[in-house]
Image: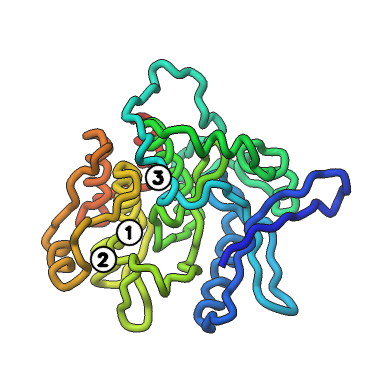
Amino acid sequence: QVVEAHIHCLETSDEQPVKVAVKMLKATAHSSETEALVCELKIMSHLGYHLNVVNLIGACTIGGPVFIVTEYCPHGDLLNFLRRKRASFSIYNGEDTDKDEPYKNIKSITNGSTKESEYLSARDLPRALAQDSLIGGDGGDGDDIEEDRSLELRDLKSFAHQVALGMAFLASRHCVHRDLAARNVLVSTAHVVKICDFGLARDITCDDNYITRGNTRLPVKWMAPESIFHSLYTSQSDVWSYGVLLWEIFSLGENPYPDIAVDGKFYRMIRDGYRMDAPEFAPCNVYQVMLDCWSGDHENRPMFNQLAQLMSKL
């Protein structure tokens, strides 16, 4: 479970508290879930800072339950954010007339690796979060105005681009996500999106998106064929999942493979090369990116640094 909290910088007493998210286990958690949470903490400690990843602020691991303290994203997960915006969505793109780029703080990826300037020491992170108007603070009226603003096509493209940037960073750090989906992307202020939930450390027991296979529950509709049939997970299997995430974004939060149950027929369809049709709001060039991500041969799928560059131009 995740709860809101506030932290104070210990070095000075005059700084405003920063709202954070605290992730912890429920009282009914099993030992495997404890291991998953500790694994997630290790992954986040290894990653370092990136704008499009939910960043680690601190943790409690001694003398009681494990707590992970991360950035707070006021608008919740991308899936439900998109669904809330369906009624007011505007297909108008607006990119040619609006010169005030609202995503100017998103950094580019070069050769699949992140520039040194994008890293931040854990010691400096709480202060940076408080000072960064994109991330820190308690929200308030600004968040309410942002929540009320309708989405446009350029917003969907920006979400897709930002996730590609975040995943390119993860790939450069040799991190395989294994559960990339709109439910695992959070929306911060200024429509900055951040990838979260590394290592499947979340409560999936009551989530219909996860199918029981053996002793585990898997997000089958987001999984690459090699992951479904051979339990092989790589950055290129994450690319397949990114294609499904694109479908979620450009359908404004519809369920993938609509009206298709996960059963023997579904597995045969995937093995035989079935791919979803274009979602309602996807331009042809975006749908082609989805199809490229869904190549049956993982070696033929684009890499995330290539996807980040491509999505920045669409």
Q: Could you tell whether 9 is left or right of 281 in the image? A: right
The residue located at (40%, 51%) in the rendering is 79
Q: Characterize the local packing of mark 2: few (<14), some (14-19) or many (20 or more) Cα atoms within 10 angstroms.
A: some
SS class of the residue under badge 3?
Answer: helix
**Number of the label disc, if any, that sits on residue 82:** 3
Q: Amino acid at mark 2?
A: Glu
In this view, the residue farthest toward the top is 97
The amino acid type of the residue labelled 3 equals Leu
| Mark 1 in CB contact with mark 2 (< 8 angstroms) | yes
Q: Quadrant of the N terminus?
A: bottom right
Badge 1 or badge 2: first in the primary sequence:
2
Q: Is label 2 in a helix, a strand or a loop?
A: helix
Q: Residue at x 39, y 22 (%)?
A: 95
Q: Is residue 228 above or below residue 57?
A: below
Side of 294 relative to 102 (left or right): left
Is residue 31 among what the camera can see? yes
Q: CA distance from mark 1 to mark 2?
A: 7 Å
Which of the 4 quarters of the picture holds residue 128?
top right
- Residue 309, visible in the rendered structure: no
Quarter of the view holding residue 82:
top left
Which is nearer the eye, 48 or 93? 93
Mark nearer the viewer, 3 or 1: 3
Numbered label attached to residue 226: 2
Mark drawn on residue 237: 1
